[in-house]
Image: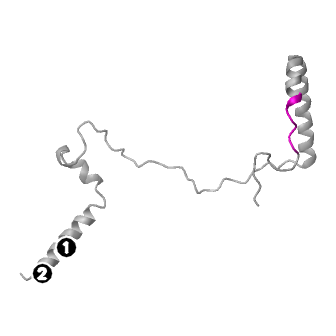
Amino acid sequence: MGRSAARAVLGAGWLALAVAGCSPGPVIDRLPEGIGGLPAGAPARPAAPYQYPAVHDMPAARSAKPLSEEEQDRLEKELQATRDRQVGREGPKAAEAAKKKPPAAKTGQNTGAKTNP
């Protein structure tokens, strides 16, 4: 056998080892613990693969429409009236604490969101 034939056989052997190393799961399960296999007390692999959530699926369209400006203002006033009634029941200290809180700005955007320049 010539040098080129020996190199070809050796290269084929290394290629076979590299390809066999791509999916070592079932092979490692059968190896003894002393040469890199699973320990004796290791749990068995699951029979079925894990089911992951479909993260790229789009949710269905919403059936409810967003509130109009008038509806949002009406609901805010109702919430403020409810808060004022509850503060009145709790006593004067709670009323003072509620008055110290500044009202939310009505800009049509979330107050905590940063604007994009």
Q: In the image, is 30 to the left or to the right of 94?
A: left
Front in this rendered view, residue 53 or 12? 12
Q: In the image, is 96 to the left or to the right of 112?
A: right
Q: Is residue 100 above or below residue 43?
A: above
Asked whether disc 1 touches disc 2, contact meaning CB atoms under 8 Å apart, the reply is no
Residue at point 66%, 53% (across, down): 59
Q: Which residues are magenta?
A: 99-105
Coordinates of residue 9 in the picture (x, y in percent): 14, 75
Which colour assignment does the render follow?
A: one colour
Q: Earlier in the sequence, mark 1 or mark 2?
A: 2
Count of all numbered marks drawn on residues in the image: 2
Tell me the SS state at disc 2. Answer: helix
Q: CA distance from mark 1 to mark 2?
A: 10 Å
The residue under label 2 is: 5
Q: Amino acid at mark 1?
A: Ala
Residue 12's tag is: 1
